[in-house]
Image (tube, rainbow, N blue to C red):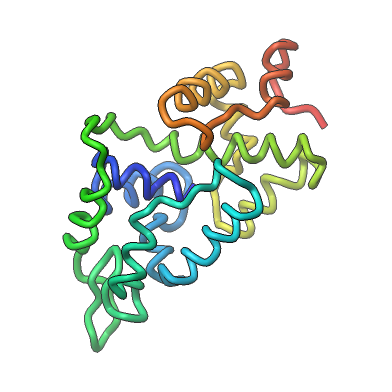
Amino acid sequence: YMNEALYCLQEGSASIEQIDKAVCDYVMPIGPFALRDMNGADIGLAVAKFNYQEYGERFRPAPVLAAMVEQKLLGQKTGRGFYIYDSETKKRTAANSDVEALAASFRNGSGSENFQVERLFLAMINEAFLVLQERVCAAQDIDPALEAGLGMRKGPLKLAQEMGLPQCLSQIEALFEKHGERFRPAPLLKRLVWGGKKTVVT
């Protein structure tokens, strides 16, 4: 979810503030960039590298994050990250245009697509179905865990059910066609849709 937000920023489909606001309006208590600044870009990069090492191509880190760490744009701890912070109060004062310019340097020239906040959560929804498929936990545990741990107002399985599983799959397949392995559809989701299921079964 947070990695996909970085890819959206790199593509130029929305600004730092637009993405954070859209996410908060949708289902989260804090945007991905504000949260990354709290945790530190260096910590985020270490986690992203570990996930990529362990889980492969669908977790390839967006390159802007490593560039931020290299330039010491770590967030609140250095006073500059996705946002700029007052040196005394540590309060956020503005989005950091340097990071937006840095993100733009990774664009491939193909043009940006219209930003859809659901894209960030479709990545999370797809991962939830992979977790179910691998029997990491039961379906009834996923949403409460993310609602408690991330403060989501609705967990990924509830979001998937509200969108409709066929619509979820259709959108994930379209994103897979455009963006590759980050959106390879979970086989369990495909089986549920092919079987005409309307909800996630345990």
Nearer-the-camera pick, 19 or 8: 8
Tell me what residue is drawn at x 46 percent, y 21 percent.
174
| Residue 189, image quadrant | top right
154 up-or-down from 17: above or below: above
- Locate the C terminus and report the quarter of the image it occupies: top right
Nearer-the-camera pick, 161 or 194: 194
Tell me what residue is drawn at x 26 percent, y 71 percent.
92
Nearer-the-camera pick, 116 or 80: 80
- Residue 36 lies, in percent from the top left, at 42, 64
Q: Is residue 147 left or right of residue 174?
A: right
- Residue 47 lies, in percent from the top left, at 55, 63
| Residue 96, image quadrant | bottom left
Tell me what residue is drawn at x 34 percent, y 42 percent.
8
- Residue 184 lies, in percent from the top left, at 57, 29
Q: Is residue 121 left or right of residue 33?
A: right
Q: Is residue 109 left or right of residue 150?
A: left
- Residue 158 lies, in percent from the top left, at 62, 35
Q: Is residue 136 left or right of residue 83?
A: right
